[in-house]
Amino acid sequence: MFRKVKALLTLTRPPNGILMFIAVLAGVTLSNRQTMTPMQMILSFITAYGLNGSIMGFNDYFDRDIDRVNAPWRPIPSGAISCFEAIFFSAILGSIGIISATLTSTSCLIVAVIAYLLAFTYNMFLKQLGLIGNMAVSGVVVAPFIYGAVLSDGYVSTRLTFFAIPVYLSVLGREIIKGISDVEGDALKGIRSIARTKGKRFAGMLGGALYIAAVSVSPFPYILDLVSWPYIVIVLLADIGFIYSAISIVKNPSRAEALKVKKMSLLWMLIALIAFIMGSIT
């Protein structure tokens, strides 16, 4: 029994669910009102963890054949849980997440449903479509920030919009660059990544261009007086990092460099998030 419960918990990817909830809280911070009640916080956690856990479970089901080779320790290929149990548990988690969003607000429900369907269809078939799949992932990453802002304000503010655009662009660039390091694995899975269909050099140039595009948007929140001065000071560090990563991957679109850039870009994204939060609360 304990082994079963542990396997079901593992299926939900707890760290991912917690990060999703943190993104919702960040979205609240980036809103205009910057308020949420204790009950809204509880419901937001249930929604974030439930929907993320559901998607992770369905992902493991769809990838079960690949995981038998690449990750045999995962709950399904290891035999800790059956395919039916994974599907049933994931469906329950998804239902709980949607119900929780419904109890929060109609606007939150709409954001949650769109994000959930986008993530589900990505697991089913969008991941095979290369750029379209990359765009779907970027949308899913931005969704919890939008959810938090909508929870607080009831709408997507201008400040949140100028946060979401560079996040979307940088995540899209990262996903394309990630494809450079995954060419061999993507070939086995039939994933038509940019690196596979257009070549590693083109993928590096496109990914780098998206990083630069994200950087080009970053001054506007300060110029439009949407954030205070700490934002521009901190975001400059992220901008320098993204520019460096863009130049690096364009000059050397190799698997090793793509892995390095992919990891470092997470740091630049974190710094940018800190910049927005500090610029919003001071």
Image (cartoon, helix red, strand yellow):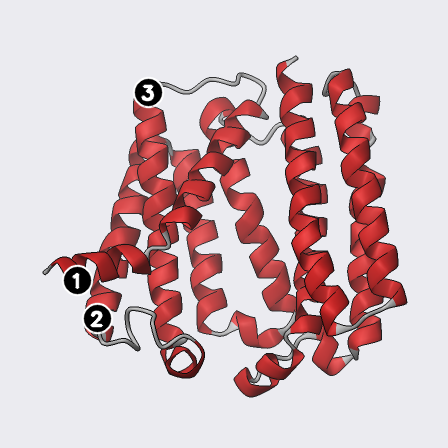
Q: Nearer the viewer, mark 3 or mark 1?
A: 1
Three-letter code for the amino acid on which mark 2 is drawn: Ala
Asked if residue 87 can be seen in this view, the reply is yes
Q: Which residue is mark 3?
A: 38
Horizontal side of 130 relative to 69 (left or right) equals right
Name the residue nearer the viewer: 201 or 37.
201
The 10 Å Cα crowd at callout 2, few under 14, some 14 to 19, many 20 or more, is some
SS state under label 3? helix
At a point 27% along the width and 52% down the height, the residue shown is: 93
Horizontal side of 46 relative to 160 (left or right) equals left
- Eyeballing the image, is 151 above or below 270? above
The answer to whether mark 1 and mark 2 are in CB contact below 8 A is yes
Q: Which residue is mark 1?
A: 3
Q: Number of numbered discs present?
A: 3
Q: Which residue is mark 2?
A: 80
Three-letter code for the amino acid on which mark 1 is drawn: Arg
Please state the horizontal and vertical placement of residue 158, each as a whole percent of the image: 68, 28
SS state under label 2? loop
Asked if residue 218 can be seen in this view, the reply is no
Horizontal side of 170 relative to 202 (left or right) equals left
Q: Quadrant of the C terminus?
A: top right
User: Which numbered disc flags the more N-terminal residue, 3 or 2?
Assistant: 3
At a point 38% along the width and 42% down the height, the residue shown is: 48
- Eyeballing the image, is 85 above or below 238? below
Q: Tell me the CA gap for discs 3 and 1.
A: 33 Å
At a point 78% along the width and 17% down the height, the residue shown is: 229
Q: Tell me the CA gap for discs 1 and 2.
A: 7 Å
Instruction: Quadrant for residue 78, please give it.
Output: bottom left
User: Which numbered disc flags the more N-terminal residue, 3 or 1?
Assistant: 1
Q: Nearer the viewer, mark 3 or mark 2?
A: 2
Q: Tell me the CA gap for discs 3 and 2.
A: 36 Å
